[in-house]
Amino acid sequence: MSRISRVSVGTKRLLLGRPFRSDTTGDTPLRKRIALPVFASDALSSVAYAPEEIFLILSLAGVSALAFTPWVGLAVAVVMVVVIACYRQNVRAYPSGGGDYEVATVNLGPNAGLGVGAALLIDYVLTVAVSISAAAANIGSAIPFVHSNEVVFAVIAIVLLTAINLRGIRESRATFAIPVYAFMAAMTALVVWGLFQVGVLGRELRAESAEFELVTPDGVAVAGLALAFVVAKSFASGCAALTGVEAIHNGVPAFRSPRARNAATTLVMLGVVSISFLLGLIVLANQLGVQVAEDPATQLIGAPEDYQQKTMIAQLADPVFAGLPVAFYVIMTITALILVLAANTAFNGFPVLASVLARDKYLPRQLATRGDRLAFSNGIVLLAVAAIVLVVAFDAQVTVLIQLYIVGVFVAFTLSQLGMVRHWTRRLGNEQIPAVRRRVQRARAVNAVGFVLTSGVLVIVMSTKFFAGAYIAVLAMLAVFGVMKLIHRHYESVARELEDSSWEVVLPSRTHCVVLVSKLHLPTLRALAYARATRPDTIEALTVNIETAETRILVREWEKRRISVPLKVVESPYREINRPVVDYVKRLRDQSPRDVVIVYIPEYVVGHWWEQLLHNQSALRLKTRLLYERGVMVTSVPWQLSSSEGRADQARDEPIIGHWGGPEDR
């Protein structure tokens, strides 16, 4: 069995590379208080747009939503029941919190685990993009100004979430519970009151789009195999409702003991609630004649020129609560809040997932560094930038982004179920007690059915959505997987090279100091003093002749002050500084290969970022170039200007976080 390590990732946890160790993130006790609301927000948020996607896909092909939508919704519900049953098995077999990542890594190998990790990284980014875009669409259904500026609204929302997470937020039970339970109450009221009015009171409730005639973009309805393809595509879109199920498996350690049983119970509860809401919204939408079009201006005949298509929940809430307008705005606000909360779970999970992969040498080490608020700042910023790029590129259109969304989830589902089948098969080979063997066989059968079903859904998703945008998610996952493999290969190569014990330490025979001089001012004098204090074998000053007049002034001033260090002048035919200095240092090394050359570079330090723009940063460029020369050491001699004093005081007040040597010595 491969060696695995565990690191808490809040709502997502994973394993890789080292033996099990205890959680050190410090957030587990707090998470135990808020487990259900956090996971519920992730699981329930997709219910806000999955039914709408089913209606949209069927409507695009001119298919009667009334005829096929209930069956598609029922098929999605069946898949959800099977997936929940499978994940109850996963929770009991792997309660450590590793989730799909652990299952795939332990049972299918590190490459499969890394594939799941890549899928989860992409899934996190899409979670933010889809959830925030859906929130913008729901708010836009109530506020026309937001509808006209959905991209701006979504970008601002992501920036605000990023700022909040960089700043650090104190999580509490009420913070997460209020939006979750409010959403559950709002959806219950919407579905129950709407169906009660239609079925019991006999009221004829109609959505605002019910009176329009929906046509396909080309005006031709589909039939036969094309119809089957459209129904399959709507089924794939509806499977977005399953995207939050795996969150509970990833967060088992956040539950109170007995953790596995409580997590399994929560899976059933959320499954029942999600299926009820999904089917209830679909039935109510059929009763009210909801019509959803990709391009309302051309597909909805009879709609006004300035018609603004609302989300399905908005089209349901408006007639159901026609006598209570406040309820409409409350429902739309609560729906937007649950979507934003679901996006925030990605801001909790992605940075820590990235940090674990970084510590295991699959991502840059900068992603494993915590900021001054003990948050993985680099990961938070990376997630925000990637989500903003998607929102802007796809114009914050949920109908487009959803095509990319569920691919990664079902990749994780499929590999997880295959891993569980191998897990139970391995256990059967070592189990002799008949009662236990029967229980293991039943568990294997459940996960085998789950594997067949989820892999079938994955095939449907890929075949129906690949050219609609899913190929982007697939290429992104392959790219992330390949990049992580290359990064790991680089770190392993560097480690082998640095740990080579065959190298014998040979001290240099002499030290030769070179002090770079541009003008004879205070930074230069300090550099000369420091260089002489090291007592080198040889010391000299070096200047590059860019302007002959200025060079002559420098030489005369040097002689006038009778500085004992000899000053050498090198020519620069192309008025360049770096190349003549590097060439001169190379000649010194060629003349005495066993000597070490120490180059002292005087530079002054400013306190404001805009002051940096006023200087050419030649010292930085020269240092970067000299670092590639063997046997050469570069020493910066800073001269702090008055503007840097305030920054120095601020730096002294900042807490020192981390340990000696940085993450690269792990």
Image (tube, rainbow, N blue to C red):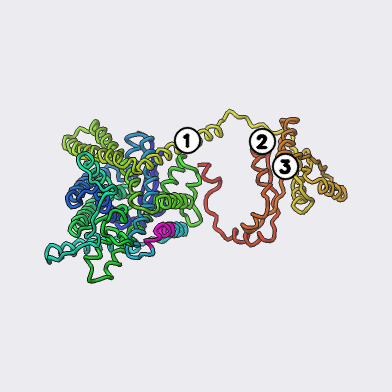
Residue 51 appears at what percent x and percent y?
25, 53
- Foreground residue, 153 or 39? 153
Residue 183 appears at what percent x and percent y?
28, 61
Look at 70% across and 58% down and name the residue there: 641
Q: CA distance from mark 3 to mark 1?
A: 37 Å
Crowding near the residue tagged with mark 2, few <14, some 14–19, many ≥20 C-alpha atoms within 10 Å = few
Give the residue pinned by disc 1. Answer: 486
Q: Check disc 3 and give the amino acid type.
A: Glu
Give the residue pinned by disc 3. Answer: 576
Q: Check disc 2 and give the amino acid type.
A: Glu
Residue stretch rendered in magenta on the structure? 146-158
Q: Secondary structure at mark 3?
A: loop
Q: CA distance from mark 1 to mark 2?
A: 26 Å
Q: Nearer the viewer, mark 3 or mark 1?
A: 3
Residue 145 drawn in magenta: no
**Closer to the N terminus: mark 3 or mark 1?**
1
Look at 41% across and 57% down and name the residue there: 151
**Closer to the N terminus: mark 1 or mark 2?**
1
Q: Secondary structure at mark 1?
A: helix
Confirm or deny contact between disc 3 and disc 1 (CB under 8 A).
no
Give the residue pinned by disc 2. Answer: 629
